[in-house]
Image (tube, rainbow, N blue to C red):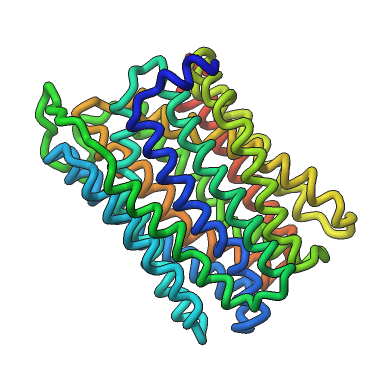
Amino acid sequence: MLKAILSLPRTVWLLGLVSLFNDSTSELIYPLMPLFLSSVLMAGPHALGLIEGVAEATASLLKLFSGVLMDKRWHAKGWVAGGYGLAALSRPLFYLVTSWPIVMALRFADRAGKGLRTSPRDALLAGAVNNEQRGLAFGLHRAMDNAGAVIGPLLAAWLLSRGVPLKNVFLWSVVPGIITIALALSIREASVVPVVKAPPFSLKMAGFPSVYKRYLLVMALFTLGNSSNMFLLLRAKELGLADYQVPLLWALVSGVAMLFSVPLSALSDRHGRTRLILAGWLTYGLFYLLLGINGFHTLLLWPLFAFYGLFLAATEGAEKALVADLAPREQLGTAYGWFNLVAGFMLLPASILFGWLWQSINSFAAFGFSAACALSAALLLRFWVMPAQS
């Protein structure tokens, strides 16, 4: 395993480092957002759902746009560097926020940066390795991404424990943001010309196999129940977790995902992507059902959130590797564009619906709905999308 990891191309490692520093910046802020909205700006679950849904869904359109343009010109570095740069510049500005609509604007800028970079980056990563290394490459990338997601919350928890005001913590995102931009600009993109010219863009997804289209539909169903992770942190706080422990809890999730992303994603290279995705989605459904229950001790949140980290480790790399397995090589950027569009755009109804169910009915109704979506998507993936390959 170690030899295989070390043999991965420079591009894979460099993209991993970019994600590490970017996520150390992003996750410094992310777990604090529910606290900031509820205790400083006095906004509830409905506002949180609207902010996250609008930001993710609108920005997801850029993921398709950048992916299509990459297929036309086969040039990813500019999109990658520009996307990371926009996100890095927006995050310190949270220090100046005085109302939740401004939070929405800054979250949109951050997610727009992600929209510009994600599809070209995924296509660049998939094109840097052969089919037998694809799961391993995406697993390593997710592991380094999650390593940054450990560093950020730990730094946030340390700063809060030292008495640093919540708003001042946002200013600490400047330095890792600068490093992220510098690393992104150092990527050396190979001049690759596809053997077959990419066909014109089609809203009907001409040129894509039917199995890929079915996969997108099932991903849409799963994502309808996969609202913003900020709801998980808000739920932990509601169950009695201390403010300074909230970023630590999210660091645990990222730490488990970091440790298991590489070995689990590598398993998908040998035993099939869908088996791993199925296991992850079932894990997700069980996690949401348990988290929706009231009355258990806050100590149980720690093993429960570690369980959620296993879901991330099992699915994040395998889901993206499966896209490259199913899509035509000459339309790889567009394929990731459609995949990221579906996953991102569905966050709008998912987050708004989740927030409405929570605030209008109760938390168990919201978490139970998400679990039902995950179970339904798992069944469809197994028996409708790829029945012979599960």
**Residue drawn at 12 percent across, 21 percent down:** 195
**Residue drawn at 58 percent across, 25 percent down:** 264
Farthest residue toward the bottom? Answer: 98
Whether residue 388 is situated above or below residue 120 in the rendered picture: above
Whether residue 190 is situated above or below residue 146 in the rendered picture: above
Q: Is residue 315 left or right of residue 90?
A: right
**Residue drawn at 47 percent across, 24 percent down:** 136
Q: Is residue 106 left or right of residue 249?
A: left
In front of the other: 281 or 316: 316
Residue 70 percent coordinates (x, y): 19, 42
Residue 388 percent coordinates (x, y): 48, 14
**Residue drawn at 34 percent across, 22 percent down:** 129
Residue 387 in view in this figure: no
Q: Quadrant of residue 125?
A: top left
Residue 271 percent coordinates (x, y): 54, 14
In front of the other: 359 or 49: 49
User: How many numbered marks, from 0 up?
Assistant: 0
Whether residue 217 is situated above or below residue 163 in the rendered picture: above
In front of the other: 136 or 308: 136
